Amino acid sequence: MGAAMTRNPAALQIGPWLKNGALRSLLVIAIVLVLKAASDLLIPIAVALVLTFVLTTPVRTLRRYGVPEALGAAVVVATLLSCTVLMGVALSGPAAQWWERAPSTMAQLTAQFDRFRASLPFIGTPQPPLPQTGRSRAQAERNAANTPDPVKEHLATEGVALTRAVIGKVFAFSISAAATVILLYFLLASEHWVVTRSIEAIPRRRSRALLLAGLRCAQREIGRFVASLALINVGVSIATYAAMIWLGLPNPLLWGVVAGVLNFIPYIGPLLTMGLLLLAGMLTYDSAAAMIAPPAMFFLIHAIESNVITPWFVGRRLSLSPVAVFLSVMFWGWAWGIAGAMLAVPALVGLRSVCKRQRRLKLLCAYLEGSYQPVPSLRSLLRPRRKANPAS
């Protein structure tokens, strides 16, 4: 019986297994847990795939002019690395200045935190009443100064752990970045070969056409969206750089680049930028109005970008539902951290491209689409449809 089942491929069908709702739910949970557990392996692959969708066009253009794909991929990757290195060199000076100011900055923040904590009841360190006599009072002040503060000891311990964690993260990031660059080169150099072999493995001609059309559509939409978002964020960087120069904030180039990079993360990135600018304003200026000016200026820039420039530049074709974008950022940020939050929107664009070509996923595609199209009223949806009169 086992030999008969092995010889008959039709007997080994997994379709009935996937029709079970409980098994489908377990499969989804297993996929989510695998995405969470294997983040160190999957993040470089996902980043390389998104960059491949963006950088495939220049490699194809070079191939049309007779440049082999291996050489064209090397040129594109080398250009990307050169731009990244030049940006890092340009930002190394301002970053080093802020790093040198870190001890004094932490001292200022600790002093402000102590003053704030001492003003709150039940939180500040209790101070015993000091005697009125001179010698006893001096001795009591020395004893109070020598009394250990548990909050400060906890902060010192956490600082050592934070330094160790930062060093580990930098090492892991270096390995992931190297793996991403190597994988990106191989994907760009063999993109045409991989697509050809994948299409060749499908027996039906219609299925081949659907797969190729869906793949090209996903590549086109993801590449266009990421390229458009990159151009918009360059404009945000330039506007933030000019605004910080006008306000007199030190190292405006650093804040411009930080604003442009964090703007790739919807919702969370602009909030982080405003928090960092508020911290920089508190450490630079004395008046409250001057402290609030840098984050307020960036808030104005972000409001213009998100409400005017992005809808006009990206267009309705690439628009997504704000609810879907927020949920995607939450999920991928939980699974993969900052890298997942940056990849959330491109992943959503690719999912929408797949849903457009699957009839069973039309409802999901409707939830992913932007809200620019007019929606019918609920009363019109509840009305009975009139049957068409048969042709006489």
Image (cartoon, rainbow, N blue to C red):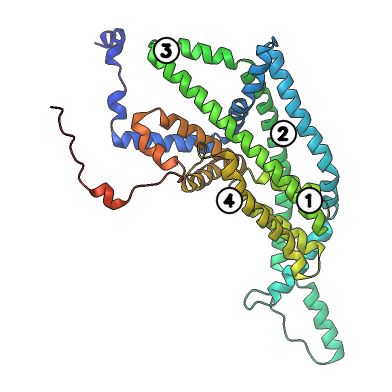
- Above or below, 297 relative to 33: below
Q: Which residue is mark 2?
A: 174
Q: Position of residue 193 (x, y in %)?
A: 57, 12
Q: Amino acid at mark 3?
A: Ile
Q: Secondary structure at mark 2?
A: helix
Q: Amino acid at mark 1?
A: Ala
**Whether label 1 touches label 3, CB < 8 Å:** no
Mark toward the start of the polypeptide (4 vs 3): 3
Q: CA distance from mark 4 to mark 1?
A: 20 Å
Q: Amino acid at mark 4?
A: Asn
> Could you say which is closer to the camera, residue 202 or residue 112?
202
User: Where residue 242 is drawn, which disc sits there?
Assistant: 1
Label 3 neighbour load within 10 Å: few <14, some 14-19, many 20+: few
Check the picture and name the quadrant holding the N terminus.
top left
Mark toward the start of the polypeptide (1 vs 3): 3
Q: Position of residue 386 (x, y in %)?
A: 19, 40
Label 4 neighbour load within 10 Å: few <14, some 14-19, many 20+: few
Check the picture and name the quadrant holding the C terminus.
top left
User: Where residue 202 is drawn, which disc sits there?
Assistant: 3
Mark toward the start of the polypeptide (2 vs 4): 2
User: Position of 236 compared to 217: left or right?
Assistant: right
User: Where residue 327 is drawn, which disc sits there?
Assistant: none
Residue at the location (45% across, 46% down)? 371
Label 2 neighbour load within 10 Å: few <14, some 14-19, many 20+: few
Q: Position of residue 363 (x, y in %)?
A: 36, 38
Q: Amino acid at mark 2?
A: Ser
- Residue 183 seen by the camera: no
Q: CA distance from mark 1 to mark 2?
A: 32 Å
Q: CA distance from mark 1 to mark 3?
A: 54 Å
